[in-house]
């Protein structure tokens, strides 16, 4: 019963959680906004003169910013493309009935439980190293020149590593969706003269559209802020070839000690993330309506 | 065109025999109804004909041509599923057009046929809606529309009306019968509702555990059931089946008499009994009468206004010419 008394009690009970959340969200945001208007460096932390939008113009005018922006988008789109298309294919495979399907399902899901830093290091040293790495050894064995992944195609390397980590997530969500497709519909389509490809295109794929939307939305949130994988592999290099916005912001603070510029970069990243979110919801959000 | 012959068709799932060897001939233009208790293999038989299930052995011939190994789409049959199986993300128009699109028909012809089907089935008003925005009866009509645009050799229906309420079921039953009158295409219809079977069929196939018990017109099955199973299955309420001393008087192991073929009297008759329950349906009254000749109550049909109540004593006399006699194996004695 929602009497005045219970309402007050409910508010009192909720208050701690709401207050903690507010502090958690609002304080860092406010402080970042505040720092982004100061000339605040770790080399001279005593003096923090107010500089207005100088940090923003400095961060945005930096040619690395544009490169990082492009890299961020390439990274997100690349990983999304691989995980969604790969996820659909793997889900279709796992939906079949074959001997050992349970073990294969377990193996496919496993990468999701590996920590990003560990996964990236394993890929860097055991897979992609041109001398010791599995790929390098394989290429040498068939008489080709091995690629030095981290210096020749740094961004692609990171895309591959991150896609490997997120493929299980996409597969899992798409598989559950696939399994909820009624057999009747497929049989009806079969009777209507649709071949395997037509059934996939006209029946299966539209059925999965909602799950695909969920995968894209959730992954985008996480992919915009990839950091650990870059830190332990290419460190944004060579040059800024594999620097994304998150990494650039961190660099401002840790390498150049420029807290002001890093804060401005942080705010820019928040704005960018919102633009991407609005764009995505406009584009595919209607799939979520029942 | 739509002649379907099954020859020595057998179906097993693993070790379980669902359909032991079965022969069946369905002639062009017939309305054939498969009836039988739940789990007797009606749907399986229909799916074998459709090609959605492979036969374990035996042959299926459609219009005289071998169809046993043909994929469903090549058999020229259309199926209406119990769940309708409409494509939820497509409009009614696209649903109906789908088989034509798959056949690679040109746009103008597709539109013409879809419009015609929509008009015949009264779907014009909903043509741009999605299936989720339709009622059960409308969905059913879309499913039928999707089947008729293909102009198939035969229609297969798997309990198409079982998800509808009683009133709608009667309406749709008529519509399907009219559709058959108009198209004169072979229809195979699965149901376990025997009113549907009796009213719609040209030919009823009674199945039990995958075996055909009897094939015949509704009236044949009603007047001459070949065994006690068919006798008990066809007709509503069920035929009274009596065994023991009373049956021996007639030289049979079991005798059967339908509720409508018992004469009811309050003064005299062959069997004396006490009314346990009386069900007044308006037009008829069904009495359940406890008698010494049978351990279960005997069902009798009386007039709607027959003045009788529970506890009253009544006399029953079977009409001799309507009495069915069965031997110890349950087969009819003629
Ligand atoms: N894919 C399958 N694998 C194993 N057994 C099956 C399979 N499909 C059906 N059966 C079995 O075959 C028998 C006949 O099933 P079927 O669906 O044809 O019955 P039905 O007559 O249509 O019943 P209902 O009136 O309940 O729809 C059942 O005993 C069922 O358990
Ligand atoms: Mg069935």
Image: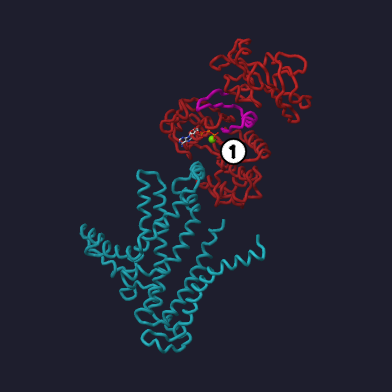
Chain colours: A cyan, B red
- What are the residue bounds of the magenta stretch? B187-215
A141 relative position to A99: left or right = left
Q: Nearer the viewer, residue B31 or A58?
A: A58
Q: Quadrant of residue A18?
A: bottom right
Query: Ligand 2: does it lie within 8 Å of the C-beta at label 1?
Result: no
Q: Residue at x 66, y 21 (%)?
A: B258
Q: Nearer the viewer, residue A180 or A75?
A: A180
Determine whether B156 is above or below A156 in the image. Answer: above
Residue A142 in percent (x, y) is at 21, 57
Residue B2 in percent (x, y) is at 54, 32
Q: Residue at x 69, y 24 (%)?
A: B288
Q: Residue at x 41, y 79 (%)?
A: A262
Look at the image and tell me whether residue B103 can be seen. Answer: no
Residue B202 in percent (x, y) is at 61, 27
B24 relative position to B179: left or right = left
* Quarter of the image where the N terminus of chain B is located: top right
**Crowd rating for badge 1 (residues with CA inside 10 Å; few <14, some 14–19, many 20+):** many
Q: Which residue is mark 1?
A: B160
Residue B116 in percent (x, y) is at 62, 44
Q: Residue at x 58, y 20 (%)?
A: B228
Q: Nearer the viewer, residue B230 or B27?
A: B230
Chain for numbered disc 1 = B
Look at the image and tell me whether residue B14 can be seen. Answer: yes
Task: Tell whether position B192 is magenta.
Answer: yes
Q: How many numbered discs, if any?
A: 1
Task: Tell whether position B308 is magenta.
Answer: no
Determine whether B57 is above or below A233 in the image. Answer: above
Disc 1 on helix, strand or loop? loop
């Amino acid at each position: 019963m929602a009497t005045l008394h219970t309402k007050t009690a409910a508010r009192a009970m909720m208050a701690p959680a709401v207050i903690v959340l507010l502090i958690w969200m609002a304080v860092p945001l406010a402080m970042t906004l505040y720092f982004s208007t100061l000339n605040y460096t770790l080399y001279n932390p005593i003096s923090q003169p107010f500089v207005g939008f100088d940090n923003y113009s400095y961060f945005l005018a930096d040619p690395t910013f544009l490169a990082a922006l492009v890299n961020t988008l390439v990274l997100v789109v690349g990983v999304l493309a691989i995980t969604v298309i790969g996820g659909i294919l793997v889900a279709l495979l796992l939906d079949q009935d074959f001997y050992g399907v349970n073990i294969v399902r377990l193996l496919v899901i496993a990468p999701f439980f590996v920590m990003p830093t560990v996964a990236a290091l394993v890929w860097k040293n055991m897979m992609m190293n041109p001398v010791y790495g599995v790929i390098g050894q394989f290429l040498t064995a068939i008489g080709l020149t091995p690629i030095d992944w981290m210096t020749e195609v740094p961004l692609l390397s990171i895309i591959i590593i991150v896609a490997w980590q997120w493929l299980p997530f996409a597969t899992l969500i798409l598989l559950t969706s696939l399994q909820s497709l009624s057999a009747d519909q497929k049989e009806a389509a079969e009777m209507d003269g649709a071949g395997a490809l037509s059934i996939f295109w006209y029946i299966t794929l539209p059925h999965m559209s909602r799950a695909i939307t969920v995968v894209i939305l959730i992954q985008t949130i996480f992919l915009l802020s990839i950091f650990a994988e870059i830190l332990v592999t290419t460190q944004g290099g060579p040059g800024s070839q594999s620097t994304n916005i998150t990494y650039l912001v961190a660099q401002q603070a840790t390498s150049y000690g420029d807290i002001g510029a890093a804060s401005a970069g942080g705010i820019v990243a928040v704005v960018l993330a919102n633009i991407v979110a609005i764009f995505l919801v406009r584009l595919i959000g209607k799939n979520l309506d029942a | 065109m739509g002649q379907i012959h099954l020859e020595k068709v057998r179906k097993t799932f693993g070790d379980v025999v669902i359909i032991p060897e079965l022969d069946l001939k369905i002639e062009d233009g017939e309305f054939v109804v498969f009836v039988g208790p739940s789990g007797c293999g009606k749907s399986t038989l229909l799916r074998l004909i459709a090609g959605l299930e492979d036969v374990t052995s035996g042959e299926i011939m459609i219009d005289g041509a071998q169809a046993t190994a043909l994929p469903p789409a090549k058999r020229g049959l259309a199926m209406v599923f119990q769940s309708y199986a409409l494509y939820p993300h497509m409009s009614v128009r696209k649903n109906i057009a789908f088989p034509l699109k798959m056949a690679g028909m040109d746009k103008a012809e597709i539109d013409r046929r879809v419009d015609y089907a929509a008009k015949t089935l009264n779907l014009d008003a909903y043509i741009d809606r999605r299936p989720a925005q339709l009622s059960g009866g409308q969905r059913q009509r879309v499913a039928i529309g999707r089947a008729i645009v293909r102009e198939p050799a035969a229609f297969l229906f798997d309990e198409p009306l079982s998800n509808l309420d009683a009133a709608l079921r009667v309406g749709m039953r008529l519509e399907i019968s009219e559709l058959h009158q108009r198209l004169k295409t072979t229809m195979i219809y699965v149901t376990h509702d025997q009113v549907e079977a009796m009213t719609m069929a040209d030919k009823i196939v009674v199945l039990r555990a995958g075996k055909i018990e009897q094939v015949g017109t509704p009236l044949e099955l009603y007047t001459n059931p070949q065994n006690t199973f068919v006798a008990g299955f066809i007709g509503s309420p069920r035929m009274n089946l009596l065994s023991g001393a009373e049956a021996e008087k007639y030289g049979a192991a079991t005798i059967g008499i339908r509720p409508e073929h018992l004469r009811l009297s309050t003064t005299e008759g062959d069997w004396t009994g006490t009314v346990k329950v009386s069900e007044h349906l308006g037009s008829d009254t069904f009495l359940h009468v406890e008698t010494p000749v049978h351990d279960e109550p005997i069902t009798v049909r009386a007039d709607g206004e027959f003045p009788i109540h529970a506890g009253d004593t009544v006399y029953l006399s079977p009409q001799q010419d309507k009495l069915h006699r069965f031997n110890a194996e349950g087969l009819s004695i003629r």
